[in-house]
Image (cartoon, rainbow, N blue to C red):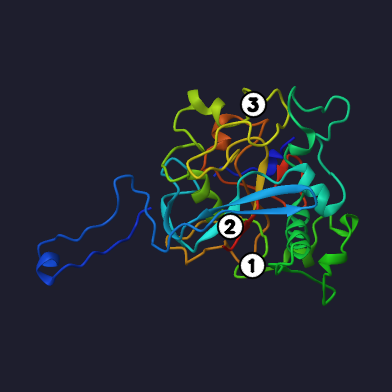
């Protein structure tokens, strides 16, 4: 169950079309777009599909954007804008079969054993991996990158020596709070896999709309887009069983919580480009709600945080550069 002691509730296309000095003086400066969701140019990156063993997964392209995030009804996520470079984000949460192919084990609570079987007609390996802490999550990202010949995004030094992620075993990853792993460094410009920043996650979840949840603005329709306490049967479900949001992403609301890179903290009024959170903190950000949460927990702007060694009900969605 979720540790409520750690639970903290917390697009515009800036296009200046200067035709002539006369038009500017006349106030004919064209900005924005009808939906208020705008892109800063460069086009949408091409989707990419990768294969690990027999397991395929797809990353969906998100164009560079001045992302309008937050809403006044969130205590800790007021309206703000973050300039995001183009990126790719997982079409689905990381599945148990992908985790198994990379890490060689399955830490999930819903592992298909007695009393934890998948719903009728669903495939066990395609349920999202969960019960992974934040240290597990970044280790998985680096090991997946190495397996696919990409550059790892994370560096962790333990006792002054860099962790050898290629040969790192699951049981060597901390399960209690670890100051060395807390100092993990991110190089967001490497071409390997990583956790999304909180801003990347929220923009992707919005799917090009101002909907409250990923895919819909009404709770009456939420059952078509999310597994949450009202329809999950108190279990996780195979990914892609609900409808996607406007960016073709599944389960951004509900199913399992998803780790982000960021330390949890107050959001600055004017975050820098590709803002990736405070330099340090006590808790890492989790987003999206889960199968055991109420509808509001899965709204696209709801912010939660957990100690990095917390694991119950939390999974992963990947991000990377195009």
Lower sequence index among marks 3 and 1: 1
Query: Label 3: few (<14), some or many (≥20) within 10 Å?
Result: some
Whether residue 131 appears in this view of the structure is no
In the image: residue 72, left or right of residue 198: left
Residue that appears at 12% across and 71% down:
21
Question: Where, quadrant-wise, is the N terminus in this rendering?
Answer: top right
Q: Which residue is mark 1?
A: 191
Q: Which corner quadrant of the image does residue 264 belong to?
A: bottom right
Which of the two discs, 1 and 2, sits closer to the camera?
1
Label 1 to label 2, Cα distance in Å? 15 Å
Query: Label 1: few (<14), some or many (≥20) within 10 Å?
Result: some
Whether residue 43 appears in this view of the structure is yes
Q: Secondary structure at mark 2?
A: loop
Residue that appears at 52% across and 42% down:
300
Q: Secondary structure at mark 1?
A: loop
Label 3 to label 1, Cα distance in Å? 37 Å
Where residue 164 sits in the image (x, y, percent)? 84, 69
Q: Which residue is mark 3?
A: 229
In the depicted structure, whether residue 275 falls above or below residue 106: below
Lower sequence index among marks 3 and 2: 2
Q: Secondary structure at mark 3?
A: loop
Q: Nearer the viewer, residue 10 or 12?
A: 12
Q: Which residue is mark 2?
A: 197
Question: Where, quadrant-wise, is the C terminus in this rendering?
Answer: bottom right
Where residue 183 sits in the image (x, y, percent)? 72, 68
Label 3 to label 2, Cα distance in Å? 26 Å
């Amino acid at each position: 169950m979720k540790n409520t002691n750690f639970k903290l509730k917390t697009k515009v296309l800036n296009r200046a079309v200067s035709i002539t000095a006369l038009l500017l003086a006349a106030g004919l400066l064209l900005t924005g777009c009808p939906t208020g969701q705008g892109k800063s140019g460069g086009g949408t990156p091409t989707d990419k599909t990768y294969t690990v063993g027999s397991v395929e997964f797809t990353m969906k392209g998100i164009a560079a954007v001045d992302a309008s995030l937050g809403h006044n009804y969130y205590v800790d996520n007021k309206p703000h804008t973050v300039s995001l470079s183009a990126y790719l984000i997982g079409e689905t949460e990381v599945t148990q079969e992908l985790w198994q192919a990379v890490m060689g084990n399955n830490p999930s609570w819903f592992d298909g054993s007695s009393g934890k079987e998948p719903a009728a007609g669903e495939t066990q390996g395609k349920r999202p991996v969960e019960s992974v802490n934040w240290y597990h999550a970044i280790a998985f990202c680096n090991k997946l990158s190495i397996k696919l010949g990409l550059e790892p995004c994370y560096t962790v030094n333990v006792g002054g020596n860099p962790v050898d992620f290629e040969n790192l075993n699951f049981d060597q990853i901390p399960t209690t709070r670890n100051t060395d792993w807390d100092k993990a460094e991110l190089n967001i410009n490497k071409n390997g896999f990583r956790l999304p920043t909180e801003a990347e996650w929220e923009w992707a979840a919005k799917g090009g709309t101002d909907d409250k949840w990923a895919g819909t603005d009404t709770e009456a329709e939420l059952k078509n887009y999310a597994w949450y306490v009202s329809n999950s049967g108190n279990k996780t479900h195979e990914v892609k069983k609900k409808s996607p949001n406007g960016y073709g992403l599944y389960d951004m609301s509900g199913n399992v919580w998803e780790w982000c890179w960021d330390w949890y903290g107050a959001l600055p009024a004017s975050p820098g480009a590709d803002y990736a959170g405070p330099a340090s903190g006590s808790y890492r950000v989790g987003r999206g709600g889960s199968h055991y949460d109420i509808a509001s927990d899965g709204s696209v702007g709801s912010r939660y945080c957990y100690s990095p060694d917390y694991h119950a009900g939390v999974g992963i969605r990947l991000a990377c550069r195009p």
